[in-house]
Image: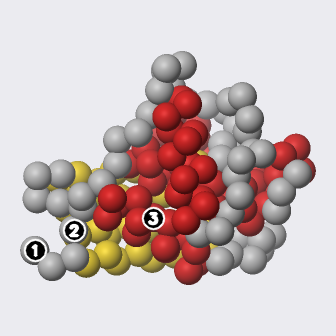
Amino acid sequence: METKFQIELVDEQTLLKIDFERMKRVVTKIFADAGYKKVTLEIAVVEAEPMHEMNVQFLGHDYPTDVLAFPMEDDKKRGIFEGNIVVCSDVAADLAKDYHWPPEDELLLYVTHGALHLVGYDDHAMEDAPVMHAKEREYLAYVDVDASHSREGE
């Protein structure tokens, strides 16, 4: 099967300037490294209110979150994946101040985090979190983002 990655950006916010090429490069690398050959992925960047609504609807959490990831089709045997990643520019802008780095890098972290979840990484168990966070730093470095200072100890 020929490798085909179709990644679309839906930008529904005005707060941040989105570097779609970096997003595309990092998710392409994550999915390729996981063995996928055909990927159709939509990355939506939204503001706090719609993210809050989705977080209530899909997870029952009454607040805006940083990232939600939705697999639609995941056939690892055939190397086919289809899904969505939704990230929140307002949350990125707020939290970037705490970690002393650009909000665009914080947003890229969310995209990376969502893509890693979609290919099978997990950070919900204490023993799995360090592995996933190391992968985040590795993939962010691939697109020239130094994430060594972000979220230390998380």
Per the rendering, the mark at residue 37 is 2
Per the rendering, the mark at residue 1 is 1
Assess disc 2: are there few (<14), some (14-19) or many (≥20) residues with their C-alpha within 10 Å of its C-alpha. Answer: some
Gap between marks 3 and 1, in whole Å?
Answer: 19 Å
Q: Position of residue 82 (x, y in %)?
A: 29, 61
Residue at 34% x, 77% y: name it.
6
Residue 105 location, quadrant: bottom right
Residue labelled with disc 3 = 27
If the image is split into quadrants, where does the C terminus sit?
Answer: top right
Can residue 89 be seen by looking at this rendering? no
Gap between marks 1 and 2, in whole Å?
Answer: 7 Å
Q: Please indicate whether residue 17 sits to the left or right of residue 139 in the image.
A: right
Residue at 43% x, 44% y: name it.
117
Secondary element at tag 1: loop
Viewer-side residue, 71 vs 152: 152
Residue at 10% x, 74% y: name it.
1
Which sits earlier in the primary sequence, circle 2 or circle 3? 3
Q: Please indicate whether residue 48 sits to the left or right of residue 97 in the image.
A: left
Viewer-side residue, 31 vs 8: 31
Circles 1 and 2: CB atoms closer than 8 Å = yes
Can residue 79 be seen by looking at this rendering? yes
Q: Position of residue 135 (x, y in %)?
A: 51, 46
Q: Please indicate whether residue 137 sits to the left or right of residue 135 in the image.
A: right
Q: Position of residue 115 (x, y in %)?
A: 45, 54
In the rendered image of this protein, does residue 102 appear above or below residue 117? below
Which sits earlier in the primary sequence, circle 3 or circle 1? 1
Q: Amino acid at mark 2?
A: Lys
Secondary element at tag 3: helix
Residue at 49% x, 34% y: name it.
131
Assess disc 1: are there few (<14), some (14-19) or many (≥20) residues with their C-alpha within 10 Å of its C-alpha. Answer: few
Secondary element at tag 2: loop
